[in-house]
Amino acid sequence: MSPQPAIVGKKLLKLTVAGPEHDPLPGPDIDRLFAANAVGTARLERLTRWSRLIATCGHTPVAVATYQSAGGELRAPDFGLDVQGCCEVDAVVSAVVHGLEVACLAAGARRVVVMPPRGGEQSLLRAGYIAIHEGCAGSWMEKTLT
């Protein structure tokens, strides 16, 4: 399922839903979207086996988020963002989180939990997400949908 693309900064912004039946993103794209040292085996497995939203500007992937429904929430533990290659960071983050919110509601859940992408934290705050800091559990951002 692919919603209508939008024109952002003279480049076409397109959001695509992919699953395990689709080809994974190539290694160089994953390295660009995530800090090379942050790509571990667990993340690579989720990027292959979980549902994911992929945002492209023109023909270049500029963001990817894995997601899975868990009880009353949708969890997105992997959100990679290429701030330098984005047509517009706010537009790209907004498109991805709106896609996550639709998936959340479709799953019958009401809360989206996201690990914020490097460089996209402010965009998530503007989209209504709040930052949660839990000592040893780490930090994430979340939004309750009404």
Image (cartoon, rainbow, N blue to C red):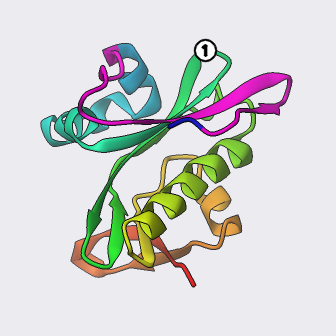
Residue visible at 25% across and 28% down in the picture? 21
Q: Is residue 65 above or below residue 13?
A: below
| Circle 1 crowding by C-alpha within 10 Å: few under 14, some 14–19, many from 20 | few
Residue 4 magenta-highlighted: yes
Residue 122 coordinates in the image, percent (x, y): 65, 60
133 is higher (above) or lower (below) than 100: below
The C terminus: image quadrant: bottom right
Q: Is residue 77 left or right of residue 121?
A: left
Is residue 100 shown left or right of residue 14? left
Q: Quadrant of residue 62?
A: top right
Mark 1 sits on what residue? 59
Depicted 54 relative to depicted 72: above or below: above
9 displayed left or right of 129: right
Task: Name the element at disc 1.
Answer: loop
Residue at x 73% of width, y 30% of height: 87
Is 53 covered by the magenta stretch? no
Magenta extent: 3-27
Which residue does the image show at 61% across and 62% down from the upper left? 124
- Identify the residue at horizontal 29%, vertical 64% (top origin): 69
Q: For residue 9, what is the image quadrant? A: top right
Q: State which quadrant residue 129 falls in.
A: bottom right
Point out residue 89 in the picture as x, y percentages from the top left corner.
Answer: 69, 42
Q: Residue 83's x, y, as percent?
A: 62, 35
Identify which amino acid the numbered label 1 is placed on.
Answer: His
Q: Is residue 116 above or below residue 126?
A: above
Considering every residue shown, the one lying at the far right of the view is 10
Q: Which residue of the protein is positioned furthest toward the bottom in this rendering? A: 146
| Figure label count | 1
Q: Nearer the viewer, residue 117 or 136?
A: 117
